[in-house]
Image (tube, rainbow, N blue to C red):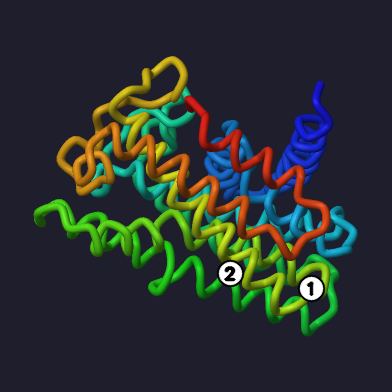
């Protein structure tokens, strides 16, 4: 196995092990814990925790200390998926090849599982044992990127955009918030966890912005060209949404993925050791799920 793939596996396994230890108490509300764990442990590449721990490492920190921060972000990401799949949102039956949370536990429990994961994310980050100043910076980053000025704001634009004609500025802003905000948090939290410089923080944000655009464009491509067996969810769900494919067409979208991947790699110049992040950007550009 290539060195970068081995490191990817090591990071993903560390995140998986940490998440597997959460929400196991045998309390009267244990069905809530079951619903939280059902979605949290349903698979996925753990790209956000991977980004957090690798940016910590390349900034000179101990990547293991950043695992709780990355997993806190994964809890927020999972809560967003649970809510996004609800009938009042995208109304999806499958996620990662499994029935969605509300299909297994009911809509009310799915809403509560998402709420609980969001709250638990901040508890997890706050309890990571980092110095107070670092903890505050991480919590501020999580709040800004997950809330009304970040991911939630992007989801609102996604819903309201269904009534609008495709507009480049609107769609780019939508995806910068809905997809890009959490990726920005993942990268910059790693820098914060290592006590990195302002230059490194800016470079991490630039990298995240570019891979976020590439990632979402590839997502839009896969909604047209992908298949259920590889994606683990239905395709064609975004046909009536304002997506990059609807705006630019498939051919141009393939070009955008490559252009933004190259831009992400170029943003890594302040880091001496950038091989893994380079390989990761290329890997995400070519993904089929």
**At which x and y percent is residue 73?**
61, 57
Q: Please state if 140 lies on the left or on the right of 287 as rendered.
A: right
Residue located at (64% from left, 64% from top): 204
Which mark is nearer the camera, 2 or 1?
1
The answer to whether any part of residue 102 appears in the image is no
**At which x and y percent is residue 37?**
60, 40
Residue located at (59% from left, 31% from top): 43
Depth order, front residue of 155/280: 280
When asked about the image quadrant of residue 251, the answer is top left
Please state, as top left, top right, bottom left or bottom right, where the N terminus lies in the image. top right
Report crowding for label 2: few under 14, some 14 to 19, many 20 or more residues within 10 A (C-alpha): many
> Mark on residue 196?
1
Between the C-alphas of marks 2 and 1, the distance is 17 Å
Report crowding for label 1: few under 14, some 14 to 19, many 20 or more residues within 10 A (C-alpha): some
Identify the secondary structure beneath mark 1.
Answer: loop
Q: Please state if 261 lies on the left or on the right of 270 as rendered.
A: left
**At which x and y percent is residue 106?**
37, 39
Q: Earlier in the sequence, mark 2 or mark 1?
A: 2
Identify the secondary structure beneath mark 2.
Answer: helix
Residue located at (32% from left, 64% from top): 173
When asked about the image quadrant of residue 186, the answer is bottom right
Residue on which disc 2 sits: 142
Residue located at (34% from left, 62% from top): 154
The answer to whether any part of residue 253 appears in the image is yes
**At which x and y percent is residue 287?**
52, 29
Taking 233 as reference, is 35 above or below it? below
């Amino acid at each position: 196995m290539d060195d970068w793939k081995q490191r990817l596996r090591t990071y993903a396994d560390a995140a998986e092990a940490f998440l597997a230890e959460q929400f196991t108490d045998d309390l009267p509300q244990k069905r809530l814990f079951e619903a939280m764990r059902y979605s949290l442990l349903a698979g996925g590449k753990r790209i956000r925790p991977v980004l957090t721990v690798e940016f910590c490492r390349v900034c000179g920190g101990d990547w293991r200390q950043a695992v709780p921060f990355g997993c806190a972000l994964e809890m927020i990401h999972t809560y967003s998926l649970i809510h996004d799949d609800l009938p009042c949102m995208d109304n999806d039956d499958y996620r990662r090849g499994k029935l969605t949370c509300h299909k297994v536990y009911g809509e009310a429990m799915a809403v509560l599982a998402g709420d609980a994961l969001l709250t638990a994310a901040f508890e997890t980050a706050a309890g990571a044992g980092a110095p107070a100043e670092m903890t505050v910076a991480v919590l501020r980053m999580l709040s800004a990127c997950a809330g009304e000025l970040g991911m939630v704001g992007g989801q609102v634009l996604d819903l309201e955009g269904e009534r609008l004609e495709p507009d480049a500025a609107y769609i780019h802003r939508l995806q910068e918030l809905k997809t890009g905000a959490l990726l920005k948090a993942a990268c910059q939290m790693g820098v914060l966890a290592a006590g990195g410089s302002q230059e490194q923080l800016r470079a991490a944000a630039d990298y995240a912005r570019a891979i976020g655009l590439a990632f979402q464009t590839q997502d839009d491509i896969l909604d047209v060209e992908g298949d259920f067996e590889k994606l683990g969810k239905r395709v064609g769900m975004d046909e009536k949404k304002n997506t990059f494919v609807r705006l630019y067409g498939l051919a141009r979208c393939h070009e955008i993925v490559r252009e933004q991947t190259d831009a992400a790699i170029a943003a890594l110049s302040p880091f001496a050791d950038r091989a893994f992040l380079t390989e990761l950007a290329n890997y995400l550009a070519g993904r089929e799920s």
